[in-house]
Image: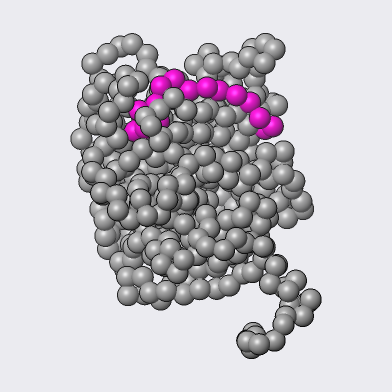
Amino acid sequence: MFLALGGFAASPAEAQAEDAPTDSVRSLVSGGLSREFILHRPANADPGPLPLVIALHGALQPAGMMQRYLDLDAIADREGFIVAYPKGMNLLWNDGRSSIAGFIPLLHKRDDGRFVLDVLDTLVAEGIADPSRAYLMGFSNGGFLTAYVACNYADRFQAYATMMMTVPVGYTESCRPSKPVPILLMNGTYDPIVPMFGRPTPGARLMSADATAALFARLGGCAAPDISSAPQARITRWNNCAPGAAVAYYEIAGGHQPPAQSTDAADALASVLLGPRRSGLDAPEEIWSFFKRFGGTPAAEIATAAPAAAAPVAATSNTRAAAPARTATPARPILREPTTLANAWQGIVPEADTRDAGTSAPTAFAAAEATPALHRPLAPGAPLPLQAGFGQDGFVQAGAGQAVPPATATRLAQVPLPPPSPLRARAASAQ
């Protein structure tokens, strides 16, 4: 890197370089550890603090690969915001499941939620990022960490987005945002890594994707949602919520890959392990369109505002009838620092009944809560509940422009059994 000396006019080539997008690797100390993140600044950036999107990569996915794979930078250059791509230690995040990335016991303490906040604080302190227009998004392992931050540090970001993530069952009790949370969620109906019907992982049993969206809608005091279709997707939007809250839930007829405007051979190769990547709907475009609806409070007001009370959003005033009080079956606490592979599974408990207590009337979340068994383990050959309303084209229509209600569109498919292993047969004959 060359340093420009004052007193000399920049050449046309140098001026053009100054107008080009720039990427740099930054470092900071978080929790006593040296951590890094990639910072992307848009071309022709306005002077002063800019909106900030922090994007968290998936497990075993380098931050630079996430940057190229997501193609968020092109939107940042067009819209004028900066993007930070933090780097997880050993390409993994401690994401709130009492294990690293949901499969490695948490043997060494590290607070990745704190690291995300430190990235934000560093860029704000340097005058690069506008704290009133800061947003957090994550894919897979990074999506779990995004949900953890939304539950525990809701006031630090104006909106959140997760891709291919469902929250642990324990979040029904432990997720208590300090303010209404605008959040967008995307899940793939053919996702083999984070199935939409949920599954157990070390440290936590995961909810279904429907129940995850319903949880955030309930926390936001939302009324009944609107359902619409998009290419290879169905979108459920809760916009009639407590002031400042909103939930958008995208069911993508694809795998463990965010949808993109177009796909290529690399996406097809990845689909062998991750399931298909759909084209026609672009994840970063949808996420930024959602993000920019929120935020914009002058930074001076944020600095002088009193801290929000750490109370459930349901306790805040809401002119739209609040959800009735709920009772949940007590669950064993999740072990926060497992020390062996055996006790890393402590805390995987059956999900509590998510239906509203004290009433038999359907609620705004009836469609999502009517199938609590979706996230329980399935026996080999058992019927697999598919996402309501999906057909071969990814969306079922009841008529011209009318969506089939999820409660009436549910259908079942038989889980295909894997072919018998030739090694297993050979071993049996050898005995």
**In the figure, 35 relative to 181: above or below?**
below
Residue placed at 47% from the left, 57% from the top?
A: 130
Residue placed at 26% from the left, 21% from the top?
A: 324
- Compare residues 61 and 152 and report the one nearer the observer: 152
**In the figure, 315 relative to 203: above or below?**
above
Residue placed at 57% from the left, 33% from the top?
A: 251
Q: Is residue 221 magenta?
A: yes
Residue 364: x and y, percent? 40, 19
Give left or right: position of 215 versus 275: left
Residue placed at 63% from the left, 51% from the top?
A: 79
- Compare residues 197 and 137 and report the one nearer the observer: 137
Residue 1: x and y, percent? 64, 84
Residue 299: x and y, percent? 40, 54
Q: Is residue 421 magenta?
A: no
Name the colour scheme. Answer: one colour
Q: Is residue 2 visible?
A: no
Residue most toward the front?
A: 7
Q: Which image quadrant for residue 285?
A: top right
Span of residues in magenta: 217-232
